[in-house]
Amino acid sequence: MDWFLILTTLLKIVVVVFLAILPSVAYSVYFERRVSAWIQDRLGPNRVGPLGLLQPIADGLKFLLKEDVTPGHVNKFYFWLAPALVLVPALVTCAVLPFGSEMQLPAWLQDLIGTKANIPMVIADLDTGPLFIFAISSLGVYGIVLAGWASNSKYPFLGGVRSSSQMISYEIALGLSIVPLLMIYGDLHLGKIVAAQAREGWSLLPLWTEGKPFAFDVKKAVLAIPVGISFIVFMIAIFAETNRVPFDLAECETELVGGYHTEYSSMKFALFFLGEYAAMIVGSCFAVTLFLGGWSLPFGLSAGQLGAVGPGVALLQFATLFIKVFLFVLFFIWVRWTLPRFRYDQLMKLGWVWLFEIALVNIILTAGLLIAFR
């Protein structure tokens, strides 16, 4: 069984990271360019391949083939280390995000490999998924701070300092925002949280019970209020944690040239953007898992898929999660090309004066409602 666990884990890593996350990162850039062009009434990339769909491949080859310049005044070891520290945490956090229930192998394959074990549709089936995500994703700020410090230049240094204070400020609100959900579900296991939503209604849309559509439940309807508040705080904090507009003060070109990546070129420069888009995709997947039922279909249609399912149903669950994440990524893109950037004092005030207090009050509100419905 040890070899079976190792083999299936490696296969899931290849599928999730190399066949899902990294291609999604590349085409998120493409969709961002197309959506921004549509918003600004222009064409966007449309020459490389049909509808410009091969543009991400051309961009990747360009970054690989461009000259990699390392300025002489930088601290070379940390200068080279920083881009990897931005990308790797974003990829590692996807290990605990469930992309299905359990897959049951076909009978002929079970006989061939000599085991009837089911495959959990998650890379690392941990009981403390949210804590793992917060612990690993918080390491991403070290890459940005190291990039700013190791560049030995004032603009990257200011970008690194801004990023560190920004991510520390919004991590608190981000962590507090999901506490009401954990109180409601009474579990830290992301797979069990998704299963509960498939059976009893999504956190934001509790419109079914025991698989029965539009079965009204007073308790779930009232608890949807603090869950909605949690969702708003969570999404604002995710924007700040991923350095997306209107929270991209760490790299704003109007003040800091390029911020922490000013001195970077070629593939090291590309790794920063890969890290940003990977964090955006993983953050969207985390939001979908907690608030919109993860891989489950609406109105209890996935209530019968909570046990082991065949490969076809497992693929449907994966596709369902992918579509939800894609819609969230489009929302990130739409916000970037719609809202202006905050001033830095406004950014800090929003994090400490508003979101932090709202998240705390929401926890107290949730606790009171749970006691009232006990």
Image: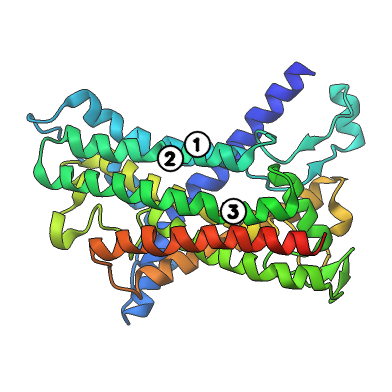
Spatial CA span between label 1 and label 3 = 15 Å
Q: Are marks 2 and 1 in contact (CB under 8 Å)?
A: yes
Which residue corresponds to mark 3?
178
Mark nearest the camera among 3 and 2 is 3
Q: Is residue 225 or residue 277 the one in the foreground?
A: 225
Q: Is residue 188 or residue 318 the one in the foreground?
A: 188
Q: Which residue does the image show at 56% across and 47% down from the upper left?
A: 20
User: Against 282, is 10 above or below?
Assistant: above
Which residue corresponds to mark 1?
135
Side of 361 relative to 144 (left or right): right
Q: Secondary structure at mark 3?
A: loop
Residue 161 position, x and y percent, is 23, 44
Q: Amino acid at mark 1?
A: Ala
Q: Earlier in the sequence, mark 1 or mark 3?
A: 1
Q: Amino acid at mark 2?
A: Ser
Residue 361: quarter of image: bottom right
Q: Which residue does the image show at 46% across and 56% down from the upper left?
A: 238
Q: Are marks 3 and 2 in contact (CB under 8 Å)?
A: no
Which residue corresponds to mark 2?
138
